Amino acid sequence: MKYEDLKKAYNDNPLVFNGALLAVFTHGSNALARPDAPVRFQVSGNIIDADMQRKMLDLACELSMVSFNDLMAFVHNDASFHFSKEFAPGLDEEGVCPVCGASVEYSGENKIDDEGGSFPWTCPECGATGREGYVRAFDRHYDVEDKDGNAIEGRPD
């Protein structure tokens, strides 16, 4: 399971995703990774029907194959955890233009504080500009624009 698969599973049904994640954290990846996973969800009342429980268990078995750090990074979107390149190809990389993939050139005023900082860059290949952010380590690119100053569509704010 890759980053985009997690994102789709969460967006398709957050209740199923959260129940599956709870099962992984409660029962452990090793128990859920077995083909005969004996786990059953204990739910009081009739809020979650048997079909929903089966979907949760199926997704939990898939989630059990994802590394703990990648799951936590997805859940928390915490800069102290970083996705592996195999898990989430295409995410921002330090020194690499997020528009065309060329090496960026740093210029302008750096913004530094106690928690990290950001550094302005320009891409010599496509003309994009932005700021490379660090929170004690590389975070992501900020304020990415094309050569005409337009925000790059589909990028997080």
Image (tube, rainbow, N blue to C red):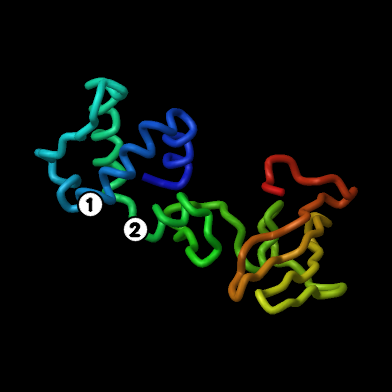
Find residue 68 and name its label.
2
Q: Is residue 42 above or below residue 100?
A: above
Q: Which residue is mark 1?
A: 29
- As rendered, which of 25 and 126 lies closer to the eye? 25
Q: CA distance from mark 2 to mark 1?
A: 9 Å
Give the image location of residue 30, x and y in percent. 17, 53
Q: Amino acid at mark 2?
A: Phe
Q: How many marks?
A: 2
> Which element type, helix, strand or loop, lies under badge 2?
helix
Residue at 15% x, 39% y: name it: 39
Residue 107 falls left or right of residue 47: right
Image-quadrant location for residue 98? bottom right
The answer to whether the residues at label 2 and label 1 have Cβ atoms under 8 Å apart is yes
Figure quadrant of the N terminus: top left
Q: What amino acid type is highlighted by mark number 1?
A: Ser
- Give residue 38's position: percent from left, percent from top: 10, 39
Q: Is residue 94 above or below residue 155?
A: below
Q: Is residue 52 left or right of residue 76?
A: left
Q: Which mark is residue 81?
A: none
Above or below, 143 against 134 in this view is: above
* Residue visible at 24% across and 41% down in the picture: 61
Farthest residue toward the front?
A: 45
Circle 2 residues within 10 Å: few <14, some 14–19, many ≥20: some
